[in-house]
Image (cartoon, grey):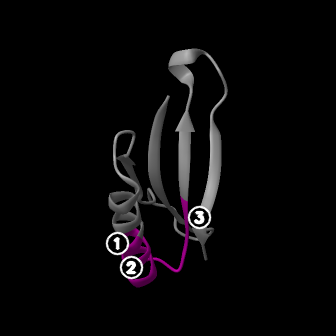
Amino acid sequence: MRRYLELFEISETTPEELDFIRIDITEWSSRDIEEALELLVEHAETSYEHYTIQIHECYHEEDKPCTIVVLSSK
């Protein structure tokens, strides 16, 4: 399993490509994940009108479905 911290910019009116940030946090400590999350929220709040930040637990290598947990959205 791989773990990712992901930020998606959301816009219903913008036709161009929206921002997407994915950070592989598979082997990170919980403290490092918290710090990265704080930075992502700060970036999202100052850069985007709407966004979603989530943890993506990827099981593709095990041929299983992924799980998503939304951590923050606006």
Mark 2–mark 1 CB contact (< 8 Å) = yes
Q: Is residue 47 left or right of residue 66?
A: left
Residue 62 lies, with reference to residue 3, above or below; the image says above
Picture quarter with the C terminus: bottom right
Query: Residue under circle 3?
Result: 71
In the picture, the disc for residue 2 is none
Query: How far apart are the two marked residues, 3 and 2, measured between alpha carbons?
Result: 13 Å
Q: Which amino acid does label 3 sit on?
A: Leu
The mark nearer the N terminus, 3 or 2, is: 2
Question: Image point 56% across, 16% down: which residue?
Answer: 62
Q: Position of residue 14 (x, y in %)?
A: 52, 68
Residue range (magenta): 38-53
Residue 42 lies, with reference to residue 66, above or below; the image says below
The mark nearer the N terminus, 3 or 1, is: 1
- Identify which residue, 50 or 55, lies in the foreground: 55
Res 26 quadrant in image: top left
Q: Where is residue 37 in the image (x, y as percent from the top left)?
A: 42, 66
Mark 3–mark 2 CB contact (< 8 Å) = no
In the picture, the disc for residue 39 is 1
Residue 62 lies, with reference to residue 15, above or below; the image says above
Give the class, few, some or many, for how many residues have Cα within 10 Å of label 3's Cα (few <14, many ≥20): some
Q: What element carries label 3?
A: strand
- Magenta stretch: helix, strand or loop mostly: helix
Magenta residue check for 40: yes
In the picture, the disc for residue 42 is 2
Q: Where is residue 10 in the image (x, y as percent from the top left)?
A: 56, 66
